[in-house]
Amino acid sequence: MDSHQSCKFIIHNTLFDLKSMYHRIGRFPKDYEDSALLLKTFINNVATWKAKTGLKDIMGPYYTPRWQEYENYDAPIRDKNFLEYAAIDGAATYHLWELLQEHIEENRKTL
């Protein structure tokens, strides 16, 4: 089985990342969850500046400042700087996902 289709993808901001994924490999994952959408449900505010969900805004303090400055999302996939960015971005996404799951568990109401 194709590993691309046999696991759950945790993606931060699917509107951007799924477009990029489709452009690079020509398909979408079958099973994914969006940490940005989940985060937005907890911090939603009519004043959008109070409800930022950008990964760099939320997780930036946990990671190297260089990660926050990266902007070349169309770089060749083997580019050293792109690979470093992608590794940190993946770690930040997963870290946020774990924090959100902890928040859900801590606030779960028993019925």
Image: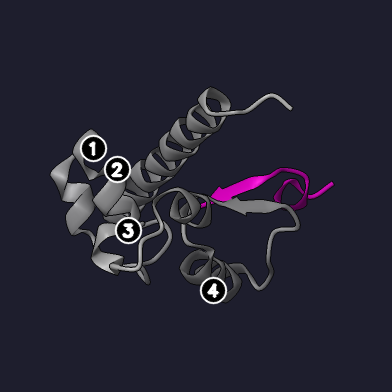
Q: CA distance from mark 3 to mark 1?
A: 21 Å
Foreground of the two, 109 or 9: 109
Q: Which of disc 2 and disc 4 is earlier in sequence?
A: 4
Q: How is the image coloured?
A: one colour
Nearer the camera: disc 4 or disc 3: 3
User: Callout 4, which amino acid?
Assistant: Lys
Which of pointers 4 and 3 lies earlier in the amino acid sequence? 4
Q: Looking at the picture, which amino acid does disc 2 mark?
A: Met
What residue span does the magenta drawing correspond to?
Answer: 1-11
Residue assigned mark 3: 51
How many neighbours does mark 1 have within 10 angstroms: few (below 14), some (14-19), or many (20 or more)?
some
Residue 108 locus on image (x, y percent): 60, 28
The amino acid pointed to by label 1 is Tyr
Residues at discs 2 and 1 in contact (Cβ within 8 Å): yes
Q: CA distance from mark 2 to mark 1?
A: 7 Å
Residue 4 is inside the magenta segment: yes
Q: Which residue is mark 1?
A: 63
Report the Cα–Cα distance between label 4 and label 2: 22 Å
The verdict on residue 65 being magenta is no
Is residue 80 visible to the viewer in this orientation of the structure?
Answer: no
> Could you tell me which secondary element the residue under label 1 belongs to?
loop
Label 4–label 2 contact, CB within 8 A: no
Q: Which residue is mark 4?
A: 19
Residue at 55 percent of width and 33 percent of height:
104
**Which badge, 2 or 3, is on the more N-terminal residue?**
3
Q: In whole angstroms, how far apart are the C-alphas of marks 2 and 3?
A: 14 Å
Q: Which residue is mark 2?
A: 59
Give the Cα distance between marks 4 and 3: 23 Å
